[in-house]
Image (spheres, rainbow, N blue to C red):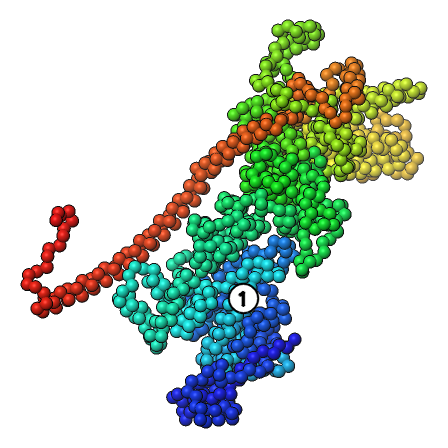
Amino acid sequence: MVLVLGSGGSPGFTLRPRTPRGTLCQCGRPRTAHPAVAMEDAFGAAVVTVWDSDAHTTEKPTDAYGELDFTGAGRKHSNFLRLSDRTDPATVYSLVTRTWGFRAPNLVVSVLGGSGGPVLQTWLQDLLRRWGGAVSWASACLPSPPRLWVASPAAQSWIVTGGLHTGIGRHVGVAVRDHQMASTGGTKVVAMGVAPWGVVRNRDTLINPKGSFPARYRWRSDPEDGVQFPLDYNYSAFFLVDDGTHGCLGGENRFRLRLESYISQQKTGVGGTGIDIPVLLLLIDGDEKMLTRIENATQAQLPCLLVAGSGGAADCLAETLEDTLAPGSGGARQGEARDRIRRFFPKGDLEVLQAQVERIMTRKELLTVYSSEDGSEEFETIVLKALVKACGSSEASAYLDELRLAVAWNRVDIAQSELFRGDIQWRSFHLEASLMDALLNDRPEFVRLLISHGLSLGHFLTPMRLAQLYSAAPPNSLIRNLLDQASHSAGTKAPALKGGAAELRPPDVGHVLRMLLGKMCAPRYPSGGAWDPHPGQGFGESMCLLSDKATSPLSLDAGLGQAPWSDLLLWALLLNRAQMAMYFWEMGSNAVSSALGACLLLRVMARLEPDAEEAARRKDLAFKFEGMGVDLFGECYRSSEVRAARLLLRRCPLWGDATCLQLAMQADARAFFAQDGVQSLLTQKWWGDMASTTPIWALVLSFFCPPLIYTRLITFRKSEEEPTREELEFDMDSVINGEGPVGTADPAEKTPLGVPRQSGRPGCCGGRCGGRRCLPSQRLRLYLADSWNQCDLVALTCFLLGVGCRLTPGLYHLGRTVLCIDFMVFTVRLLHIFTVNKQLGPKIVIVSKMMKDVFFFLFFLGVWLVAYGVATEGLLRPRDSDFPSILRRVFYRPYLQIFGQIPQEDMDVALMEHSNCSSEPGFWAHPPGAQAGTCVSQYANWLVVLLLVIFLLVANILLVNLLIAMFSYTFGKVQGNSDLYWKAQRYRLIREFHSRPALAPPFIVISHLRLLLRQLCRRPRSPQPSSPALEHFRVYLSKEAERKLLTWESVHKENFLLARARDKRESDSERLKRTSQKVDLALKQLGHIREYEQRLKVLEREVQQCSRVLGWVAEALSRSALLPPGGPPPPDLPGSKG
């Protein structure tokens, strides 16, 4: 598409002074280049003495546009366009972003000056090279619209220069090229050149009214003449501005300023829904024309960054800006300003330049100075300081974009020092967009900062915002796949497009959590549409926000049916935002249960995570949460043992009414069970009402003589705190089945994806399925997940099979065999009871781990046994057809040889009788003591002996020692943690025995009949009140008791966090960090002191000058007759009394 844009001509001829014979116009073109009408205007009645571009040029459709092919550069084509300096910048911006295909920028840096010198200082070259990559990084971090976070394209940043292959433009092009070669991400830096058409060398090759696709451009063959310069091949786009001049620099300044001002008014992001595009002018060196350029930029409210030390206009403005901040502004100061301008611009008009500098200083808030003495300060820091300084307002609305920039670049230090100093009145709604950016970009420090400055999280977190947060998940991540799977299983349809952007649908987080954790441990996202902004779409608030019933009354900002801390904690856990999750856990309630639930969720997702690095990060975070739960519960237990026990047995509505013990077992948090508080509770449960100090002999006597129970032979412990009926309520189902409460029937749920192998009867999901909520198939799968349950099932099956065979005629001996095996299984099953013992329990754990090593060792041994057994049997007895004997000699004989039983007389023919005992031809031997007809071949018998030697060497030395080494490693690894394994298994054993009836077989039938009658006689949905004697592994507190318990837990959580913060401050790393900060502060103060010293010296010189002037005045007056005779009065000394 060809756009009709202005192209300057030169119809007006104005004679340039001091040219030979008047042949050169002020526009730079010779007399012969002008048409006849221009000559008539020049020598007619209306003689023009000053040439003006607007008055002496006309516009016509452009004749130079298309693509540039730099011959010999070896890079892709660049876009170019010749246009008038009066062209509308909106048209050009639309051309770049729509026709040329460049994405709208997130950051624009316009580099000015430095075009006169071909050689740039070394430190300036390094500065440009370092900032070239920083511009790309800063652009990539700029906030995009949250709802389009996933679909938004890669970010781009624009660097605008003159685009010529000389001076500063050449070095910027090299820096951009180096960055593009080293960059592998989606962020791209686009270098754009805005050059005057009259100074472009070989510009005639670009002229083609129909467009050039491409135009062959020769850029390095002609010698330098100092008037025309070639275009730089490292740029992606060129705007060749034609203002009618020829060989004159600066003709593009007007169009370039208008373009920069227009871009600064546009928005970032797709559809312009982001922040205003930051535009920063970077001045390096520069002649006196740059003062006009900077003056126009400040009038357009564009911030400018002055690179001090680069020379020219940059140094002049930097020194002037420093002087305006210094005290004193007398005549001497004005004289220094004129001397400074004369020093930097000796050929310029002093009065005009001084007036320009003064007008620029009236908007000094738009100027920021960067010096090489500032050190390697990051580019985003410099840009952010310049933009914040350019605001110059006390209204919070003027700093919203700068705050979002600080969030995007993760500069919390600048936000604290520049934006939250107390002079800006921030309101909660001002901070919501920045908080959304902080959450999406994983900026935990900014989340803390914004919430601490009054942001209301309860009003911020809406269903749509939470949906935007979940949409930030990477496309191929685990949580994204789970959310898609949940949406497909729920039968939801893809949202329709509206206004060019997809309307986000709140994700079914509850369904995902139930898939991961099961119904018991999953946080409750109740069903039913409580909020529907789009009727007919079928989703509600409950699909993405927790309700009040699932949260504690102590949840902060838990208004409007929301639990913001818990919702954000789950979001951070699912997206694996470690620091975010830690912060939300610290701010929320239900601290112990939330830490264990977070550990469970992270470990389940780590098992499902296909990415190894992501899985390792989830495991590390789960370990941290486990440690937080352990330490916090230890703090609570040291305060009150009774309340800590209630904290363990209390059901947590946030995690599906699961208790801390259930969550810890599901999460395999063995360190949690190893605590004294948990073991003390388990000991109380194991002993019941009896004191744990009761001797064993008393228990044995009472077992054989039950009336002794009512004597003082057995002591019973007294409860430290008797609970009242209003304070405690116990579930009858926990007594009957050892499970959770019975509620309304829910739809059948899928089997949890992440149920650990340790989950069985005592697990969370098993606890739920013990009632009437789960299907029999699900209950069976959960029951078989426990290895001891599998052992019980095998034992019972063998018992029934053995009894059946004994009662069947002809199968008596088979039944006896089965019962013998069954007896062995029942005997091995007794090991489970021994796990409660402190000495035997850890040893059983070690043996179980070693059995796994034996299982893997048998693979190596089996391969070697088969290889050796088949080879030797084929060499010794090639004609034997007795299949059972062959199998016995192939497998059983090599196995016995490992333990030293080597029948040499059956393998070595030297020990046999050489006789032809076979009907087949060949050499045969008869082993001594063998039956007639069992012959051994003598052929290659030496190979049999060699194989025996090799087999014994490998099996007895290599493999057996490998097994011993595996046992040693397992023992050394498990021995230190065997206590943790044992204490976790002890909980399962105690819970299992508490769920069983009290009477032993065969009287257990009475207990079963009693429980059946109670279940049948009980009214539905009306649980009977129970007494403390029927307490099991779950306790139900009243609202008041639960509120007091959670308050007590929150207090200890705060104390725990304060202690951790204090320990962290006292650590060596923090001390070193504080020392480094103090040293930096001292260096800054020393710099200020040096600055003050310089100012004092200036003041001293001024005072001395004033003293000399006053002395001269006094002397002149004393010589005249104007003063009375006598000297001046003496000075008033300090402390003198008048």
User: Which residue is pictured at 48% across the width and 35% down the height?
Assistant: 1058
Locate residue 820 relative to residue 335 in the image: left or right.
Answer: right
Q: Could you say which is closer to the camera, residue 286 or residue 440?
A: 440
Crowd class of label 1 (few under 14; some 14 to 19; many from 20; radius 10 Å): many
Q: Is residue 1024 above or below residue 89?
A: above
Residue 303 screen position, x and y as percent: 45, 63
- Secondary element under disc 1, as helix, strand or loop, is helix
Q: Is residue 543 above or below residue 225?
A: above
User: Which residue is pictured at 45% across the width and 84% down the height?
Assistant: 51
- Outermost residue, left direction? 1125
Q: Could you say which is closer to the camera, residue 724 or residue 1013?
A: 724
Q: Quadrant of residue 902?
A: top right
Type of the residue with mark 1:
Ile
Q: Could you say which is closer to the camera, residue 252 or residue 128?
A: 252
User: Which residue is pictured at 73% across the width and 47% down the height?
Assistant: 538
Q: Is residue 82 above or below residue 580?
A: below
Residue 395 screen position, x and y as percent: 46, 54
The residue that mark 1 highlights is 263
Q: Is residue 1076 visible?
A: yes
Locate residue 720 relative to residue 809 in the image: left or right.
Answer: left
Residue 457 screen position, x and y as percent: 56, 44
User: Which residue is pictured at 62% across the width and 22% down the height?
Assistant: 726
Q: Is residue 959 visible?
A: no
Residue 511 screen position, x and y as percent: 71, 42
Q: Could you say which is closer to the camera, residue 1041 or residue 930?
A: 1041
Considering the image in quadrants, where does the N terminus appear? bottom right
